[in-house]
Amino acid sequence: MSRDLPGLTLDELATELDSRQRAVEVLKWLGSLKELPAELPLLMPGVSHRVWSTFRQQHGVSRLRVSERSVSEDGTTKYAVDVGGATVETVRIPAKGRSTICISSQAGCTRRCVFCATKELGFIRQLKAEEMVAQYLLARAEAPASAPARNVVFMGMGEPMDNLDEVLRAVEVLTQGPFPQLRQQSVTVSTSGVLPGMVRFLEESKASLALSLNATTDEVRARVMPQNKTWPIGALLEALREAAAVDPDRDTFVEYVLFKDVNDTDDDADRLVALLAGLPARVNLIPYNPFPGTGLETPGPERVKAFHARVARQGQLCLIRWPRGREIAAACGQLVLAQDGGPGFLPAAVALS
Ligand code: SAH
């Protein structure tokens, strides 16, 4: 099976081109582009014509078409990206000195979290690694020089652990030199808590992990995340503890979407601290971005601040992720359906670092 260039690792490129130096030249060329071309060029500097023309016959480019681009006041830009028959979303979130690119790992999603707009789409298909890397490349091309694209979060559409081979490959490519050469800590894979995939990820990757916890009791979590019946809170946190013992340097985040009167009480704050005791994890509190039909509501800002203060006061690292790009429906859980007149769509306007 031939993969498009953005999905190939340096080692694979070196094998195909019969030289590591040639592979490095190709990656340098990729890094020099403003955007991906429609097809590979006829000539590649540093690679012999014979070798390159053979490569060119076997590999495409994975250039993705942006069917819609929405920019919010704070500069957050949401791209509706055509991946051949399906649309996924990529978001570029500028911050001081660097931008975070939020990418999708599936068209639609294999999971059914009640509060997430992507579930409305159902599952359409898995994305290939090259389609994930190409999302990064297209958003990177538009990042301002003052805020280059240094971070990637897998928080767009999809459950990364349900497409793990391709996600691991994309992480490897994104972090390899000479390009894109992102730091392992700067790439964060976010999971709804698919335990077997999460365990394998922790064993095989050094990238950062975010676990979407979203509740402090199994009863409440199962209500908003039905898969909790299969992989409950205790098992998920135990896996994080074991991984932290092996690799204490990994950055681990716990995502906690706040729903009014469901998981935002003082008792929840105290239970959250107790659950995470001894785990070197940072909590990101995300006020729920509402969409119709869920029966869930957003707590007021005072409640969000009180919850945060109660957690932080007990020594747990904790940040509030106020929504960004809300007016363009680019905040968490909202990335999808806006263009079809649907509920408005999905990813995580969550810059993690
Ligand atoms: N499937 C992965 C990645 C996609 S969701 C996961 O679940 O982690 C990315 C983040 O957005 C998760 O932390 C999720 O809990 C959060 N999220 C989903 N829908 C949301 C909504 N409507 N409001 C706020 N956050 C939401």
Image (cartoon, rainbow, N blue to C red):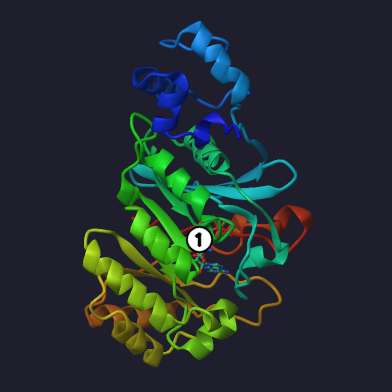
Residue 170 visible from this viewpoint: yes
Foreground of the two, 190 or 198: 198
- Quarter holding residue 210: bottom left
Q: Position of residue 32 (x, y in %)?
A: 43, 22
Return the residue found at the far bottom: 267
Quarter containing the C terminus: bottom left
Q: How many marks?
A: 1
Q: Position of residue 123 (x, y in %)?
A: 69, 60
* Residue occupying the point 23% across, 64% down: 246
Characterize the local packing of mark 1: few (<14), some (14-19) or many (20 or more) Cα atoms within 10 angstroms. many
Tell me the kind of residue under disc 1: Met
* Residue occupying the point 49% across, 32% down: 141
Q: Position of residue 333 (x, y in %)?
A: 58, 64
- Quarter holding residue 248: bottom left
Q: Position of residue 341 (x, y in %)?
A: 78, 58
Foreground of the two, 248 or 348: 248
In the rendered view, tell whether residue 316 sits above or below residue 127. Answer: below
Foreground of the two, 95 or 2: 2
* Residue occupying the point 47% across, 63% down: 197
Quarter containing the N terminus: top right
- Quarter holding residue 176: top left
Determine whether the residue tagged by mark 1 lies in a helix, strand or loop.
helix
Q: Which residue is mark 1?
A: 161
Residue 321 visible from this viewpoint: no
Return the residue found at the far right: 341
